[in-house]
Amino acid sequence: MVPLEWYIGLSTVLFVIGVVGFLIRRNILIMLMSIELMLNSVNISLVAFSHYLQDLRGQVLVFFIITVAAAEAAIGLAILISLFRNKEAVHTDEMTEMKG
Amino acid sequence: MLPKIFFGYFAVVMVVLSLLIVTRKNPVHSVLWMLALFFHIAGLYLFLNAEFLAAVQVILYAGAILVLFLFVVMMLNLKEEVMGERFGKEWPVGISIGAFILVLFFFTINKFSQGPTGQYTIERIKAETHTKAIGSVLYTEFLLPFEIASLILLIAIVGAIVLAKKTK
């Protein structure tokens, strides 16, 4: 039997890789994919908890996370397309409209 | 012993694949590595006795979301992306924040202690079949969140159309 801590450790490592990818990449497309990676790592830990605690609520929560991930991907890609159409830019440091 | 070897394979391959996703220069390669990662996650779900979720993972993530990503990657002009710099100027800050979160989480995992277990044991799920058991929880206890999820999807449809429409 694999201990539960291993699953949480794997999920942590994947989440941190997603965070780092989101912070260091310039391409918005890769940043969106890093968000998907983070959501997936949370899903892994939820399913592992659900299995080890013998409760199905964690797996139901995974459904809702998948729903939100699908909505987020659709809207994020729509924003990306309209950005590319207006500014020909997919990099974060080329967008300075908000003077951030 | 055999389950640990299985888990070790999945863990190593998943970490390597996610590192490839965030470091590859060409976004098409990133999307394809992500496809491999999602299949491995589905395999891990099967390993955790969540076969319906494994099917949903393959159909929804690998089938729908990644195809959407691939469409957008193919539509955008990628020539300058392959030539240009792939990391922003602030990458040491990002990596140190990531290392900090990693250390914090691993200290927390050491302190973890398991709570009381619920009523859905593996034998009960096997007797009831996984899809039926998960459906009976989803449509009774989580009925209102389920309806709200449908609303979120409706907002996503309308929002995506409004944002991607050509403005005159």
Image (cartoon, rainbow, N blue to C red):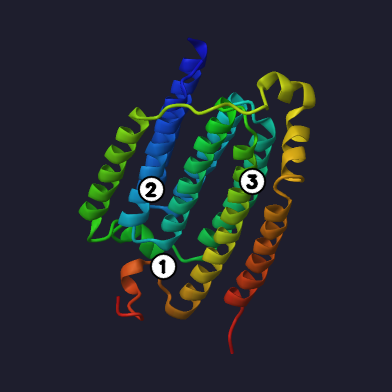
Q: Position of residue B116 (x, y in %)?
A: 55, 27
Is residue B18 visible in the rendered structure shown here? yes
Q: Helix or strand or loop: what does disc 2 sit on? A: helix
| Amino acid at the residue labelled 3 | Phe
Of residue B138 and residue B9, the one placed in the foreground of this image is B138
Q: Which residue is mark 2?
A: B22
Does the CB distance between marks 2 and 3 fall below 8 Å? Answer: no
| Amino acid at the residue labelled 2 | Val
| Amino acid at the residue labelled 1 | Val
Q: Position of residue B72 (x, y in %)?
A: 54, 62
Q: Is residue B19 left or right of residue A46?
A: left
Of residue A62 and residue B89, the one placed in the foreground of this image is A62
Residue at mark 3 to residue at mark 1: CA–CA distance: 30 Å
Front: mark 2 or 3: 3
Q: Which residue extends farthest bottom?
A: B168
Q: Residue at x 40, y 29 (%)?
A: B112
In the rendering, which numbered label is found on residue B133? none
Q: Position of residue A17 (x, y in %)?
A: 36, 44
Q: Which residue is mark 1?
A: A90
Lower sequence index among marks 3 and 1:
3
Looking at the rendering, in which quadrant would you find the C terminus of chain B? bottom right
Residue at mark 2 to residue at mark 1: CA–CA distance: 16 Å
Chain letter of mark 1 equals A
Q: Residue at x 34, y 61 (%)?
A: A26
Q: Which residue is mark 3?
A: A63
Looking at the rendered structure, whether the residues under marks 2 and 1 are on a common chain is answered as no
Label 3 crowding class (10 Å Cα cut-off): few <14, some 14-19, many 20+? Answer: some
